[in-house]
Amino acid sequence: MSVPHALQILTFVVLISALTKPLGAYMARVFLGERTALSRVLSPLERAIYRLCGIDAAEEQRWTGYAAAALLFNLAGMVLLYLLQRLQGFLPLNPQGFGPVAPDLAFNTAASFSTNTNWQAYAGESTMSYLTQMAGLTVQNFVSAGTGIAVAVALIRGLARRSADTIGNFWVDLVRATLYVLLPISVVVALFFVSQGIPQNLNRYVQATTLEGTPQLIAQGPVASQEVIKLLGTNGGGFFNANSAHPYENPTPLTNLLEMLLIFAIPAGLTYTFGRMVGDTRQGWAVWAAMAALFLAGLVVALLTEQAGNPLFAQFGIDQSASNLQPGGNLEGKEVRFGIVASVLFAVVTTAAACGAVNTMHDSLLPLTGAVTLFNMQLGEVVFGGVGAGLYGILIFALLAVFIAGLMVGRTPEYLGKKIESFEMKMAMLFVLAGAASILIFTAWASVAPYGVGSIRNPGPHGFSEILYAYSSGTGNNGSAFAGLNTNTAFYNVTIALAMLVGRFLMMVPVLAIAGSLARKPRVPPSLGTFPTDGPLFVSLLVGTVLIVGALNFLPALALGPIVEHLLLTAGHTF
């Protein structure tokens, strides 16, 4: 790896590290109800929203009420988005005259954006009107991200409170996450994106003529406003089909770096928020360190694989004298403006953070790199993860880790002074098994059914990897894809939508149940037998727990896909 390439990665890691504390501290003040720099401007608006919606900000909810509010709110948003797509042909702000979206695709898209997944089985610039893009997709980008943050904050309260029956108010947490965190950053960054050349208008598409005399339709629209929240909210759905490889979504190396920073900013910052709210910032940094270790391990494997290049070049006697198998590394499917390092870094960041925005085509990654992106999603959205979901996911694994540690020494495990007992373990296992079952059952079904394998365009193990990736991405609420699979069919639209709903809500409810259970418990003072959860030993145990659970669940499936594909490729066998 050259010095400039190493500096790209170092710059990204340093900037994320530097953002974690100030952003995390700001979010802690927001959710603790303390004054912030924006309170003078936003507090009157916040109170007006509560009055308009009939919300009593002082009234808190038990976990059952909190969960019911979150589920009903997101169900309502999903229904409204479905109707908006079906009726867009009759609604304004549709200068291209797009007709209604097909029922199965509309269902898939409504489930996708309401679950913070943004899986897209369509090309946005040729399917969705401006009204649908703005009032439907972009709005869901905000509120789905706000929902994830709210649930994470509720779990933090469960760990921080003593003998309490409530874990907060979902409506207050949702409003504050959207109003104080997501909107201010989005407004500032959207203006910067416009300055870099990203469009933000309501004009008709431009009919141009190329130098060869061929007509070309150039799509444009309200791109910048959707671009920023798709990244900041770890949503991922692009205005254009090419996503962040499109020059109107990602025009310069500076925007490319900023987009990656936006993806990690809130998930990283929430770890510090967690530490502040439980009264021990070392706990937050320990969680951050575990996430960073998992991220860097995957990044190293992916970079070494892509820079080494395709092993078939060595099989055919090409470049045998060079240190690389392929001259320059594997540039297949990558945007030449960014090159291998920036493209691979983006791919690992977006799959680690459950974002799904892409600046390279993941279907063209070499098998081991594809395995890294798959495994990032299959680990449970915990390698920084989605906004909110990453934090509550890694905290579930933290409970599993201290439970394992407790079994080793023969005492009841504790985490932050709360005893971890059978109810918490049952809910934690439901969280882990729900995601694994969704990925593996749907993948198995699609791999044997004629209507599933009929969409595969690449035979052999790579075709299986495409199916596995689709359901891993859907269940992990990521939204990226191996593009060689035609998923715009009734079967894939419905089953991937169900996978997205399972991965979001069936895993969210156990988290809130754990929050309610922990909030009711008193805090036990530490003793000589208490396992410390703020040091390197706990970080190592947490990383090991995440990897072992992921390997036990998914290693057989990975062996059938990217691993066997890699072995066959090195042997010179293609399909």
Image (spheres, rainbow, N blue to C red):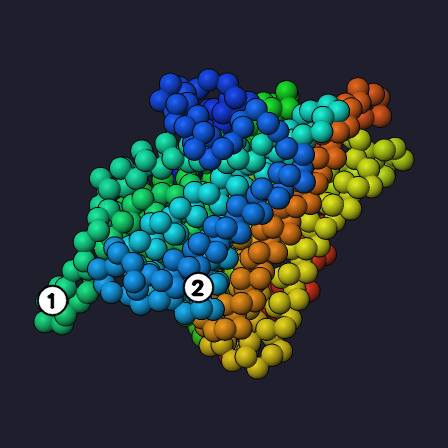
Looking at the picture, how far across and down is residue 398, in whole percent?
Answer: 70, 38
Name the residue beneath numbered marker 2.
106
Q: Which amino acid lies under the numbered mark 1 shown in the image of this protein?
A: Thr
Above or below 258: residue 351: below
Q: Which amino acid lies under the numbered mark 2 shown in the image of this protein?
A: Ala
The structure residue drawn at horizontal position 16% and vertical position 60%, both measured from the top left corner, is 206
Looking at the picture, how far across and down is residue 459, in whole percent?
Answer: 52, 78
Instruction: Answer with the quarter of the image where residue 474 lies.
Output: bottom right
Looking at the picture, how far across and down is residue 70, in whole percent?
Answer: 57, 43
What is the total number of numbered labels drawn onto the structure image? 2
User: Which comes sooner in the sequence, label 1 or label 2?
Assistant: 2
User: For numbered disc 2, what is the local secondary structure?
Assistant: helix
User: Quick check: can you spot residue 474?
Assistant: yes
**Going by the image, does 163 lie left or right of 227?**
right
Name the residue beneath numbered marker 1.
209
Looking at the picture, how far across and down is residue 535, in whole percent?
Answer: 68, 28
In front: 461, or 179? 179
Q: Residues within 10 Å of mark 2 (few under 14, many from 20)?
A: many
Above or below 463: residue 176: above
In front: 71, or 13? 71
The structure residue drawn at horizontal position 50% and vertical position 76%, both measured from the top left corner, is 456
User: Quick check: can you spot residue 312?
Assistant: no
The structure residue drawn at horizontal position 67% and vertical position 30%, both measured from the top left corner, is 166
